[in-house]
Amino acid sequence: MNTSSEQWEQDAAAIRAAHPRHILFLCIGNSSRSQLAEGIARSLAPAGTKISSAGSIPTRVNPLALRVHWPLSDPSLGDDGDSVPLDTYRRVRDELRRRLTEVFKPGDGR
């Protein structure tokens, strides 16, 4: 899991500055990361902000999409790729909560 602060904090600041009215979390299967992110964001987002998630199976990744991409581990794969330990989900959940708290932190003029 990439926890370096420099890039994702810049991404969070840019999202916050845009005052988004709708945020879509997209991952391949819409079964783990995007669902976790949607639930956390709904609890943190200001009133009137629509939060959604979706899944897609892309044939290739657009390089521009990688510039706002937060590369988190897929908890459905587990630590060893075969099992799905609850601790893996908890680590991803906690990292998403940390990053989304930064996106929706108060005091930005909303």
Image (cartoon, helix red, strand yellow):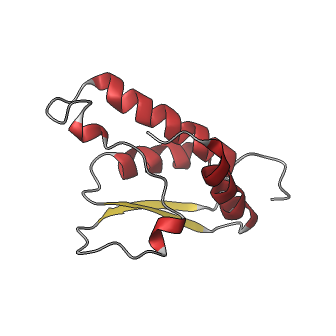
Tell me where residue 46 appears, x and y as whole percent: 67, 53
Badge count: 0
Tell me where residue 82 appears, x and y as whole percent: 13, 33
> Dividing the picture into quarters, in which one does residue 87 lie?
top left
Residue for point 54% across, 64% down: 68
**Location of the C terminus (image quadrant):** bottom right
Q: Nearer the viewer, residue 77 or 37?
A: 77
Q: Nearer the viewer, residue 89 or 61?
A: 61
Q: Nearer the viewer, residue 89 or 4?
A: 4
Q: Is residue 46 above or below residue 82?
A: below
Tell me where residue 71 appears, x and y as whole percent: 44, 51
Residue for point 56% across, 43% down: 43
Residue for point 27% across, 30% down: 79
Q: Is residue 51 left or right of residue 53?
A: right
> Dividing the picture into quarters, in which one does residue 25 lie?
bottom left
Residue at the left extreme of this rendering: 82
Q: Is residue 47 above or below residue 78?
A: below
Q: Is residue 74 left or right of residue 18?
A: left
Tell me where residue 30 appears, x and y as whole percent: 29, 55
Residue for point 84% across, 49% down: 107
Q: Nearer the viewer, residue 93 or 106?
A: 93
**Location of the N terminus (image quadrant):** top left
